[in-house]
């Protein structure tokens, strides 16, 4: 058994000792969106710090716990706070929670984040369904492959599952929530980008920029978790306006968008559950 899998199994054993709940859908909540977990029907909560070997997030606005419960009738595990590469963790730590949620039994991973709008058509407060991604941080699959989870050279041609995307699109339409669709690019952060970097990523084909998600989506695809993702465009990326960016602004916009976001995620989860 690989060392990485051994560590994962230890976390899983720890989870099993404390929680008996098998989620169908796993959700990750981004900056400013964490409060969503407080609105679902909760069955149990597990703090990251109570899982031996689990990396702990240090970003303010991220709570740091798994919430188990129901969205409608759908069994979910919600990550309230994620682990970022810019915090200094190795990639194996960054994606460990994703792999752990796979072991918990989740079949679908629903990723959310706050992101900067790169596409000139986007405005702050928009939602963007992630159609594809560009990962500008090291792949989380570098190093010994975890054969127990997936193959050495996994396909990435459908990272954000077509059918799941279609379900979210239909849901947004039904709710009359405008939904952009585009490519998410992950840079390391923690600094926001320079205007030249934003011009570069636009040239590369990105519509939104952030500091999470892409590496998580790679790990999810590797271990066979079907993935879907929505970005909350919390600000226009650097250089589009001449206003300096702050984390407070990002959180504030995400907070304002939270009620609509909650609606979109809730109904999308219920729709997606019909597909699994
Ligand atoms: N850049 C990178 N990450 C972000 C941004 C941004 O403008 N907004 C929210 N997360």
Image (cartoon, rainbow, N blue to C red):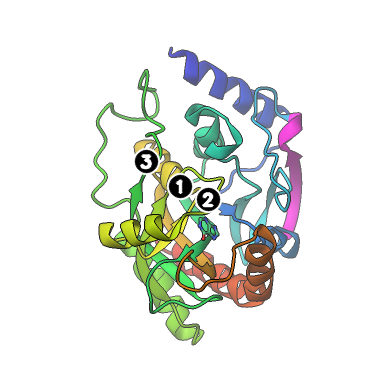
User: Are the residues at dot 2 and dot 1 in contact (C-beta closer than 8 Å)?
Assistant: yes
Say which element carries label 3: loop
Say if 270 sits above or below 136 in the image.
Answer: below
Q: Which mark is residue 224?
A: 3
Q: Could you say which is closer to the camera, residue 212 or residue 40?
A: 212
Q: Assign the magenta stretch its main secondary structure.
A: strand
* Residue 132 occupies quadrant: bottom left
Magenta stretch holds residue 48:
yes
Which of the two labelled residues, at mark 3 and mark 2, occupies the earlier sequence position?
Answer: 2
Please provide percent x and percent y for residue 205.
Answer: 28, 61
Q: Which residue is mark 2?
A: 24
Magenta segment range?
41-50
Magenta stretch holds residue 216:
no
Q: Which residue is mark 1?
A: 107
Circle 3 crowding by C-alpha within 10 Å: few under 14, some 14–19, many from 20: some
Q: Residue at x 64, y 60 (%)?
A: 246
Say which element carries label 1: loop
* Residue 45 occupies quadrant: top right
Which of the two labelled residues, at mark 2 and mark 1, occupies the earlier sequence position?
Answer: 2
Q: Residue at x 67, y 39 (%)?
A: 57
């Amino acid at each position: 058994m690989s060392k990485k899998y051994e560590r994962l199994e230890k976390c899983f054993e720890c989870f099993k000792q404390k929680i008996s709940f098998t989620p169908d859908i796993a959700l990750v909540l981004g900056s400013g969106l964490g409060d969503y977990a407080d609105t679902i029907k909760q069955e149990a909560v597990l703090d990251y710090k109570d899982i031996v070997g689990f990396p702990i997030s240090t970003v303010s606005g991220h709570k740091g716990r798994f919430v188990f419960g129901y969205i409608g009738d759908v069994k979910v595990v919600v990550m309230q706070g994620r682990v970022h590469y810019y915090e200094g963790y190795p990639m194996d730590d960054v994606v460990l929670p994703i792999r752990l949620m796979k072991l918990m039994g989740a079949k679908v991973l629903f990723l959310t984040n706050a992101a900067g709008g790169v596409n000139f058509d986007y405005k702050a407060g928009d939602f963007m369904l992630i159609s594809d991604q560009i990962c500008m941080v090291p792949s989380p699959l570098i190093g010994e492959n975890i054969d127990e989870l997936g193959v050495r050279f996994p396909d990435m041609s459908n990272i954000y599952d077509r059918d799941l995307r279609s379900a979210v699109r239909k849901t947004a339409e039904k709710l009359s929530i405008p939904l952009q669709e585009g490519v998410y690019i992950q840079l390391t952060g923690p600094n926001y980008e320079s205007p030249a970097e934003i011009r570069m990523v636009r040239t590369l084909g990105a519509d939104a920029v952030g500091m999470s998600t892409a590496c998580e989506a790679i790990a999810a695809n590797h271990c066979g978790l079907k993935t879907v993702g929505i970005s909350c465009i919390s600000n226009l990326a650097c250089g589009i306006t001449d206003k300096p960016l702050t984390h407070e602004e990002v959180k504030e916009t995400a907070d304002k968008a939270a009620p609509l976001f909650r609606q979109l995620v809730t109904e999308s989860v219920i729709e997606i559950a019909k597909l699994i």
